[in-house]
Image (cartoon, rainbow, N blue to C red):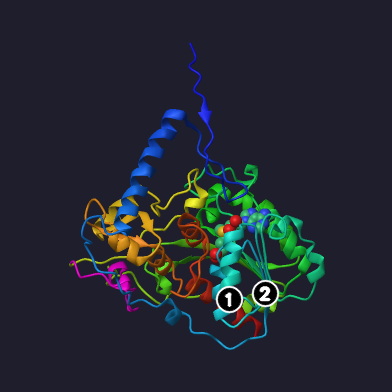
Amino acid sequence: MTIVTETVPSRIKSTDPLHEPRELTAEQREVFRVRAREARLAKIAAASGVGETPLHEVNVPTFDPDELMPQLPSNGITTLSLFSGGGGLDLGFDRAGFVHRGSWEWMSDAAATIRVARPEWDVYGGTELGDVRNVDWRAFRNQIDVVHGGPPCQPFSNAGKQRGAQDPRDMWPEFVRAVRAVRPRAFVAENVAALASATFSDYVEEHILAPLRGAYEIQRVLLQAYEFGVPQVRRRVFFIGFRTKTMAKKWRAPSAKFRRIDDSESNLPAVTGVRKALGLPDIGYDGISPTIRSGLSGPRHTTSILSSVSAQRKFEALNVWPNGVAASREAASAYVTKNGHFRLSVADVALLQGFPETWPFQGATYMQLGQIGNSVVPPVAYAVASSVAEAFK
Ligand SMILES: C[S@@+](CC[C@H](N)C(=O)[O-])C[C@H]1O[C@@H](n2cnc3c(N)ncnc32)[C@H](O)[C@@H]1O
Protein backbone atom coordinates (compact mmCIF):
# COMPACT_ATOMS: atom_id res chain seq x y z
CA MET A 1 0.00 0.00 0.00
CA THR A 2 1.39 3.45 -0.86
CA ILE A 3 0.76 6.29 1.51
CA VAL A 4 0.15 9.56 -0.31
CA THR A 5 1.28 12.51 1.77
CA GLU A 6 0.03 15.79 0.42
CA THR A 7 2.20 18.85 0.84
CA VAL A 8 0.74 22.29 1.35
CA PRO A 9 2.32 25.50 0.08
CA SER A 10 3.77 28.13 2.39
CA ARG A 11 1.73 31.31 2.89
CA ILE A 12 4.90 33.37 2.94
CA LYS A 13 5.75 34.81 -0.46
CA SER A 14 9.25 34.05 -1.76
CA THR A 15 11.47 37.01 -2.56
CA ASP A 16 14.04 35.14 -4.62
CA PRO A 17 12.41 34.47 -8.01
CA LEU A 18 13.89 30.95 -8.10
CA HIS A 19 13.40 30.09 -4.43
CA GLU A 20 12.40 26.44 -4.00
CA PRO A 21 10.29 26.27 -0.82
CA ARG A 22 10.41 23.17 1.36
CA GLU A 23 7.67 20.64 0.68
CA LEU A 24 5.83 20.13 3.96
CA THR A 25 2.65 18.41 5.01
CA ALA A 26 0.00 20.42 6.84
CA GLU A 27 1.12 18.87 10.16
CA GLN A 28 4.80 19.66 9.57
CA ARG A 29 3.97 23.21 8.55
CA GLU A 30 1.90 23.60 11.71
CA VAL A 31 4.92 22.64 13.87
CA PHE A 32 6.97 25.43 12.25
CA ARG A 33 4.06 27.84 12.56
CA VAL A 34 3.71 27.21 16.31
CA ARG A 35 7.47 27.57 16.83
CA ALA A 36 7.57 30.80 14.81
CA ARG A 37 4.57 32.16 16.72
CA GLU A 38 6.22 31.44 20.09
CA ALA A 39 9.42 33.12 18.96
CA ARG A 40 7.46 36.12 17.67
CA LEU A 41 5.60 36.53 20.95
CA ALA A 42 8.80 36.18 23.00
CA LYS A 43 10.45 38.80 20.79
CA ILE A 44 7.52 41.20 21.16
CA ALA A 45 7.50 40.68 24.94
CA ALA A 46 11.25 41.33 25.11
CA ALA A 47 10.92 44.49 23.04
CA SER A 48 8.25 45.84 25.40
CA GLY A 49 10.38 45.06 28.46
CA VAL A 50 8.30 42.09 29.66
CA GLY A 51 10.93 39.42 28.95
CA GLU A 52 13.79 38.20 31.12
CA THR A 53 16.44 40.61 32.34
CA PRO A 54 19.01 41.08 29.56
CA LEU A 55 22.09 38.90 30.00
CA HIS A 56 24.35 41.34 28.28
CA GLU A 57 24.65 45.04 27.63
CA VAL A 58 24.27 46.27 24.07
CA ASN A 59 27.67 45.35 22.65
CA VAL A 60 30.11 47.88 21.24
CA PRO A 61 32.25 46.19 18.55
CA THR A 62 35.99 46.81 18.33
CA PHE A 63 36.34 45.58 14.74
CA ASP A 64 36.11 48.01 11.82
CA PRO A 65 36.32 46.31 8.39
CA ASP A 66 37.00 49.70 6.75
CA GLU A 67 40.44 49.59 8.35
CA LEU A 68 41.15 46.44 6.31
CA MET A 69 40.28 48.24 3.08
CA PRO A 70 41.42 51.87 3.18
CA GLN A 71 39.69 53.91 0.46
CA LEU A 72 42.07 54.23 -2.50
CA PRO A 73 41.88 57.16 -4.92
CA SER A 74 40.17 56.54 -8.26
CA ASN A 75 42.26 54.38 -10.58
CA GLY A 76 40.00 55.19 -13.55
CA ILE A 77 39.32 51.48 -14.23
CA THR A 78 35.62 51.00 -15.03
CA THR A 79 33.48 48.08 -13.83
CA LEU A 80 30.15 46.39 -14.45
CA SER A 81 28.75 44.20 -11.67
CA LEU A 82 26.43 41.24 -12.37
CA PHE A 83 24.53 39.28 -9.69
CA SER A 84 25.44 42.08 -7.30
CA GLY A 85 23.43 40.85 -4.28
CA GLY A 86 23.84 43.23 -1.33
CA GLY A 87 27.08 44.55 -2.82
CA GLY A 88 30.05 42.75 -1.20
CA LEU A 89 32.06 42.55 -4.41
CA ASP A 90 30.92 46.05 -5.43
CA LEU A 91 32.08 47.51 -2.11
CA GLY A 92 35.52 45.87 -2.35
CA PHE A 93 36.06 47.19 -5.89
CA ASP A 94 34.80 50.61 -4.87
CA ARG A 95 37.18 50.93 -1.92
CA ALA A 96 40.04 49.75 -4.15
CA GLY A 97 39.43 52.81 -6.37
CA PHE A 98 37.53 51.30 -9.33
CA VAL A 99 34.91 53.34 -11.19
CA HIS A 100 31.44 51.75 -10.94
CA ARG A 101 29.34 51.83 -14.14
CA GLY A 102 26.43 49.54 -13.29
CA SER A 103 25.05 46.78 -11.04
CA TRP A 104 22.38 44.19 -11.93
CA GLU A 105 20.52 42.27 -9.23
CA TRP A 106 17.03 40.85 -9.53
CA MET A 107 16.12 40.79 -5.82
CA SER A 108 14.66 44.23 -5.18
CA ASP A 109 15.74 44.46 -1.53
CA ALA A 110 19.34 43.59 -2.40
CA ALA A 111 19.41 46.14 -5.23
CA ALA A 112 17.92 48.68 -2.78
CA THR A 113 20.85 48.07 -0.40
CA ILE A 114 23.35 49.11 -3.06
CA ARG A 115 21.19 52.02 -4.16
CA VAL A 116 20.93 53.39 -0.60
CA ALA A 117 24.66 52.84 -0.02
CA ARG A 118 25.69 54.53 -3.28
CA PRO A 119 22.81 56.73 -4.54
CA GLU A 120 24.98 58.06 -7.38
CA TRP A 121 25.48 54.58 -8.94
CA ASP A 122 23.42 53.02 -11.74
CA VAL A 123 21.74 50.07 -10.05
CA TYR A 124 19.29 47.91 -12.03
CA GLY A 125 17.05 45.93 -9.68
CA GLY A 126 13.92 43.77 -9.76
CA THR A 127 12.82 40.86 -11.93
CA GLU A 128 12.65 42.91 -15.14
CA LEU A 129 15.39 45.55 -15.10
CA GLY A 130 17.66 43.64 -12.72
CA ASP A 131 17.54 40.27 -14.52
CA VAL A 132 20.83 39.84 -16.36
CA ARG A 133 19.09 37.58 -18.88
CA ASN A 134 17.23 40.62 -20.22
CA VAL A 135 20.32 42.74 -20.89
CA ASP A 136 21.82 43.32 -24.32
CA TRP A 137 25.43 43.76 -23.22
CA ARG A 138 26.60 44.87 -26.67
CA ALA A 139 25.74 48.43 -25.62
CA PHE A 140 28.85 48.27 -23.41
CA ARG A 141 31.16 46.66 -25.97
CA ASN A 142 34.79 47.75 -25.54
CA GLN A 143 33.71 50.48 -23.10
CA ILE A 144 34.29 48.67 -19.80
CA ASP A 145 37.56 47.52 -18.25
CA VAL A 146 36.35 44.89 -15.77
CA VAL A 147 33.18 42.78 -15.56
CA HIS A 148 32.75 41.13 -12.19
CA GLY A 149 30.14 38.96 -10.52
CA GLY A 150 29.28 36.02 -8.35
CA PRO A 151 26.76 33.85 -10.22
CA PRO A 152 24.45 32.02 -7.77
CA CYS A 153 26.33 29.27 -5.95
CA GLN A 154 23.35 26.99 -5.12
CA PRO A 155 23.90 24.70 -8.16
CA PHE A 156 27.40 23.89 -6.80
CA SER A 157 27.17 24.36 -3.05
CA ASN A 158 27.88 21.41 -0.73
CA ALA A 159 24.75 22.48 1.14
CA GLY A 160 22.61 21.93 -1.97
CA LYS A 161 21.86 19.15 -4.45
CA GLN A 162 24.87 20.04 -6.66
CA ARG A 163 22.88 19.75 -9.89
CA GLY A 164 25.28 22.08 -11.74
CA ALA A 165 24.10 22.82 -15.30
CA GLN A 166 20.80 20.99 -14.59
CA ASP A 167 19.88 23.57 -11.94
CA PRO A 168 17.65 26.38 -13.30
CA ARG A 169 19.62 28.75 -11.07
CA ASP A 170 22.82 28.11 -12.98
CA MET A 171 23.66 31.55 -14.36
CA TRP A 172 27.27 30.95 -15.43
CA PRO A 173 26.23 30.94 -19.11
CA GLU A 174 24.84 34.44 -18.51
CA PHE A 175 28.11 35.66 -16.99
CA VAL A 176 30.01 34.20 -19.96
CA ARG A 177 27.54 35.81 -22.40
CA ALA A 178 28.11 39.23 -20.77
CA VAL A 179 31.91 38.90 -20.91
CA ARG A 180 31.84 37.81 -24.54
CA ALA A 181 29.58 40.72 -25.50
CA VAL A 182 31.26 43.47 -23.44
CA ARG A 183 34.84 42.29 -24.08
CA PRO A 184 36.29 43.89 -20.93
CA ARG A 185 40.06 43.91 -20.43
CA ALA A 186 39.57 41.64 -17.42
CA PHE A 187 36.87 39.75 -15.58
CA VAL A 188 36.53 38.48 -12.02
CA ALA A 189 34.02 35.78 -11.08
CA GLU A 190 33.53 34.35 -7.61
CA ASN A 191 31.90 31.15 -6.36
CA VAL A 192 31.86 28.49 -3.65
CA ALA A 193 35.08 26.50 -3.30
CA ALA A 194 33.21 23.35 -4.41
CA LEU A 195 33.30 24.71 -7.96
CA ALA A 196 37.07 24.21 -7.89
CA SER A 197 36.68 20.55 -6.87
CA ALA A 198 36.94 17.47 -9.08
CA THR A 199 33.13 17.08 -8.98
CA PHE A 200 32.73 20.14 -11.17
CA SER A 201 35.90 20.02 -13.28
CA ASP A 202 33.95 19.00 -16.40
CA TYR A 203 31.37 21.70 -15.73
CA VAL A 204 34.08 24.37 -15.33
CA GLU A 205 35.88 23.27 -18.48
CA GLU A 206 32.76 23.13 -20.61
CA HIS A 207 30.79 26.13 -19.35
CA ILE A 208 33.42 28.61 -18.12
CA LEU A 209 36.90 27.96 -19.49
CA ALA A 210 36.17 26.65 -23.01
CA PRO A 211 33.83 29.47 -24.10
CA LEU A 212 36.22 32.17 -22.82
CA ARG A 213 39.62 30.62 -23.43
CA GLY A 214 40.12 31.97 -26.95
CA ALA A 215 39.76 35.55 -25.75
CA TYR A 216 41.07 35.38 -22.15
CA GLU A 217 43.96 34.01 -20.13
CA ILE A 218 42.14 32.59 -17.10
CA GLN A 219 43.62 31.89 -13.68
CA ARG A 220 42.00 30.52 -10.57
CA VAL A 221 42.65 31.21 -6.91
CA LEU A 222 41.07 29.98 -3.67
CA LEU A 223 40.97 32.61 -0.93
CA GLN A 224 40.16 32.29 2.75
CA ALA A 225 38.34 35.13 4.54
CA TYR A 226 40.27 35.05 7.84
CA GLU A 227 43.55 35.43 5.94
CA PHE A 228 42.31 38.90 5.00
CA GLY A 229 41.38 39.90 8.55
CA VAL A 230 37.70 38.89 8.73
CA PRO A 231 36.91 36.54 11.65
CA GLN A 232 35.25 33.79 9.60
CA VAL A 233 36.21 30.54 7.88
CA ARG A 234 35.04 31.12 4.33
CA ARG A 235 36.89 29.71 1.33
CA ARG A 236 35.86 30.87 -2.10
CA VAL A 237 37.18 30.43 -5.63
CA PHE A 238 37.88 33.38 -7.93
CA PHE A 239 38.31 33.08 -11.70
CA ILE A 240 40.38 35.96 -13.02
CA GLY A 241 40.62 36.46 -16.76
CA PHE A 242 42.76 38.94 -18.70
CA ARG A 243 42.52 39.74 -22.39
CA THR A 244 46.29 40.04 -22.81
CA LYS A 245 49.04 37.62 -21.87
CA THR A 246 51.08 40.54 -20.50
CA MET A 247 48.43 41.43 -17.92
CA ALA A 248 47.86 37.79 -17.03
CA LYS A 249 51.58 37.33 -16.41
CA LYS A 250 51.74 40.49 -14.34
CA TRP A 251 48.86 39.43 -12.07
CA ARG A 252 49.77 38.09 -8.65
CA ALA A 253 47.22 36.35 -6.46
CA PRO A 254 46.56 38.24 -3.21
CA SER A 255 48.59 36.83 -0.35
CA ALA A 256 47.44 36.17 3.22
CA LYS A 257 47.79 39.05 5.67
CA PHE A 258 46.52 37.33 8.84
CA ARG A 259 46.81 33.92 10.47
CA ARG A 260 44.34 31.85 12.42
CA ILE A 261 44.42 32.55 16.15
CA ASP A 262 45.58 28.98 16.90
CA ASP A 263 48.28 28.86 14.17
CA SER A 264 51.53 29.39 16.08
CA GLU A 265 53.79 28.67 13.09
CA SER A 266 52.93 31.71 11.01
CA ASN A 267 54.60 35.10 11.55
CA LEU A 268 51.52 36.98 10.37
CA PRO A 269 49.36 38.87 12.89
CA ALA A 270 46.46 36.82 14.29
CA VAL A 271 43.00 37.60 12.98
CA THR A 272 40.69 39.13 15.60
CA GLY A 273 38.38 36.59 17.25
CA VAL A 274 34.58 36.81 17.08
CA ARG A 275 34.17 37.80 20.74
CA LYS A 276 36.80 40.51 20.61
CA ALA A 277 35.51 41.79 17.25
CA LEU A 278 31.97 42.11 18.63
CA GLY A 279 33.14 43.66 21.91
CA LEU A 280 32.00 40.75 24.12
CA PRO A 281 33.46 40.01 27.57
CA ASP A 282 36.49 37.72 27.84
CA ILE A 283 35.44 34.11 28.60
CA GLY A 284 38.96 32.72 28.31
CA TYR A 285 38.37 31.56 24.73
CA ASP A 286 38.04 33.26 21.37
CA GLY A 287 38.03 31.99 17.80
CA ILE A 288 36.72 32.67 14.32
CA SER A 289 33.20 32.13 13.09
CA PRO A 290 32.29 29.09 11.00
CA THR A 291 31.04 29.90 7.49
CA ILE A 292 27.96 32.07 7.66
CA ARG A 293 25.34 30.65 5.36
CA SER A 294 22.62 32.49 3.49
CA GLY A 295 19.10 31.48 4.45
CA LEU A 296 17.98 32.61 0.99
CA SER A 297 19.61 29.56 -0.59
CA GLY A 298 17.68 27.12 1.57
CA PRO A 299 14.12 25.84 1.26
CA ARG A 300 12.95 27.96 4.21
CA HIS A 301 13.53 31.64 4.85
CA THR A 302 15.22 31.87 8.21
CA THR A 303 17.04 34.14 10.62
CA SER A 304 19.60 31.43 11.43
CA ILE A 305 23.13 31.66 10.02
CA LEU A 306 24.02 28.08 10.89
CA SER A 307 25.50 25.94 8.11
CA SER A 308 26.18 22.60 9.86
CA VAL A 309 26.36 20.63 13.10
CA SER A 310 30.07 21.36 13.41
CA ALA A 311 29.27 25.08 13.01
CA GLN A 312 26.81 24.73 15.90
CA ARG A 313 29.61 23.33 18.08
CA LYS A 314 31.92 26.22 17.15
CA PHE A 315 29.28 28.79 18.04
CA GLU A 316 28.67 26.98 21.33
CA ALA A 317 32.38 27.21 22.19
CA LEU A 318 32.16 30.94 21.49
CA ASN A 319 29.04 31.25 23.68
CA VAL A 320 27.25 32.74 20.69
CA TRP A 321 23.72 31.80 19.60
CA PRO A 322 23.48 31.57 15.78
CA ASN A 323 19.69 31.29 15.44
CA GLY A 324 16.97 33.92 15.69
CA VAL A 325 19.34 36.74 14.75
CA ALA A 326 17.75 40.00 15.90
CA ALA A 327 17.10 43.09 13.79
CA SER A 328 19.19 45.36 16.03
CA ARG A 329 21.71 45.17 18.90
CA GLU A 330 19.10 46.56 21.30
CA ALA A 331 16.57 43.89 20.30
CA ALA A 332 19.27 41.18 20.58
CA SER A 333 20.18 42.19 24.11
CA ALA A 334 16.53 42.34 25.23
CA TYR A 335 15.57 38.99 23.68
CA VAL A 336 17.36 36.58 26.02
CA THR A 337 18.53 33.24 24.57
CA LYS A 338 17.47 30.00 26.28
CA ASN A 339 21.05 28.81 26.91
CA GLY A 340 22.35 32.18 28.07
CA HIS A 341 24.61 32.68 25.05
CA PHE A 342 25.05 35.98 23.22
CA ARG A 343 22.31 36.71 20.67
CA LEU A 344 23.60 38.12 17.40
CA SER A 345 22.08 41.07 15.56
CA VAL A 346 22.13 41.73 11.80
CA ALA A 347 24.83 44.37 12.37
CA ASP A 348 27.01 41.79 14.18
CA VAL A 349 26.61 39.25 11.37
CA ALA A 350 27.46 41.96 8.82
CA LEU A 351 30.67 42.68 10.75
CA LEU A 352 31.59 38.99 10.83
CA GLN A 353 31.19 39.05 7.04
CA GLY A 354 33.49 42.09 6.74
CA PHE A 355 30.90 44.81 6.08
CA PRO A 356 31.35 48.15 7.85
CA GLU A 357 28.59 49.30 10.23
CA THR A 358 27.51 51.91 7.69
CA TRP A 359 26.51 49.43 4.94
CA PRO A 360 22.69 49.85 4.83
CA PHE A 361 21.19 46.40 4.24
CA GLN A 362 17.53 46.71 3.20
CA GLY A 363 14.53 44.43 3.64
CA ALA A 364 13.21 42.14 6.37
CA THR A 365 15.70 40.60 8.80
CA TYR A 366 15.92 37.25 6.94
CA MET A 367 16.43 39.16 3.71
CA GLN A 368 19.29 41.26 5.12
CA LEU A 369 20.91 38.12 6.54
CA GLY A 370 20.47 36.41 3.18
CA GLN A 371 22.29 39.24 1.41
CA ILE A 372 25.10 39.05 3.96
CA GLY A 373 25.44 35.26 3.77
CA ASN A 374 25.45 35.39 -0.05
CA SER A 375 28.12 38.03 -0.32
CA VAL A 376 31.79 38.12 -1.09
CA VAL A 377 33.59 39.25 2.07
CA PRO A 378 34.40 42.87 1.12
CA PRO A 379 38.04 42.85 2.34
CA VAL A 380 38.63 39.75 0.17
CA ALA A 381 36.95 41.51 -2.78
CA TYR A 382 39.21 44.50 -2.05
CA ALA A 383 42.33 42.29 -2.12
CA VAL A 384 41.28 40.73 -5.44
CA ALA A 385 40.36 44.11 -6.93
CA SER A 386 43.70 45.61 -5.82
CA SER A 387 45.58 42.69 -7.40
CA VAL A 388 43.72 43.25 -10.68
CA ALA A 389 44.49 47.00 -10.57
CA GLU A 390 48.21 46.16 -10.26
CA ALA A 391 48.02 44.14 -13.48
CA PHE A 392 46.52 47.19 -15.26
CA LYS A 393 49.55 49.35 -14.39
C1 LIG B 1 26.04 34.77 -4.67
S1 LIG B 1 24.97 36.11 -4.78
C2 LIG B 1 26.08 37.40 -5.21
C3 LIG B 1 26.58 38.19 -4.07
C4 LIG B 1 27.44 39.37 -4.45
N1 LIG B 1 28.52 38.99 -5.34
C5 LIG B 1 28.04 40.04 -3.21
O1 LIG B 1 29.25 40.05 -3.08
O2 LIG B 1 27.28 40.54 -2.37
C6 LIG B 1 24.15 35.82 -6.30
C7 LIG B 1 23.09 36.86 -6.62
O3 LIG B 1 22.62 36.66 -7.95
C8 LIG B 1 21.27 37.08 -7.98
N2 LIG B 1 20.68 36.55 -9.22
C9 LIG B 1 20.38 35.27 -9.52
N3 LIG B 1 19.89 35.18 -10.77
C10 LIG B 1 19.90 36.45 -11.28
C11 LIG B 1 19.51 37.00 -12.54
N4 LIG B 1 19.02 36.24 -13.51
N5 LIG B 1 19.68 38.32 -12.73
C12 LIG B 1 20.15 39.10 -11.74
N6 LIG B 1 20.52 38.65 -10.52
C13 LIG B 1 20.40 37.32 -10.30
C14 LIG B 1 20.71 36.51 -6.70
O4 LIG B 1 19.53 37.17 -6.34
C15 LIG B 1 21.86 36.76 -5.72
O5 LIG B 1 21.72 37.98 -5.05
Which residue does the numbered mark 1 point to in the structure image?
93
Residue 132 point in image, percent of width and height: 71, 58
Q: Secondary structure at mark 2?
A: strand
Depth order, front residue of 72/87? 87
Depth order, front residue of 208/51? 51
Which residue does the numbered mark 2 point to in the structure image?
79
For the residues labelled 2 and 1, say whether their Cβ atoms are less than 8 Å apart: yes
**What's drawn in magenta, residue-wise?**
266-283
Most distant residue in the left direction: 284
**10 Å neighbourhood of mark 2: few (<14), some, or many (≥20)?**
many
Q: Is residue 332 left or right of residue 378?
A: left
Residue 86 point in image, percent of width and height: 55, 64
Residue at (71, 68) in percent of width and height: 216
Quarter holding the C terminus is bottom right
Residue 368 appears in view: yes
Residue at (41, 58) in percent of width and height: 291
Q: Secondary structure at mark 1?
A: helix
Residue type pointed to by label 2: Thr
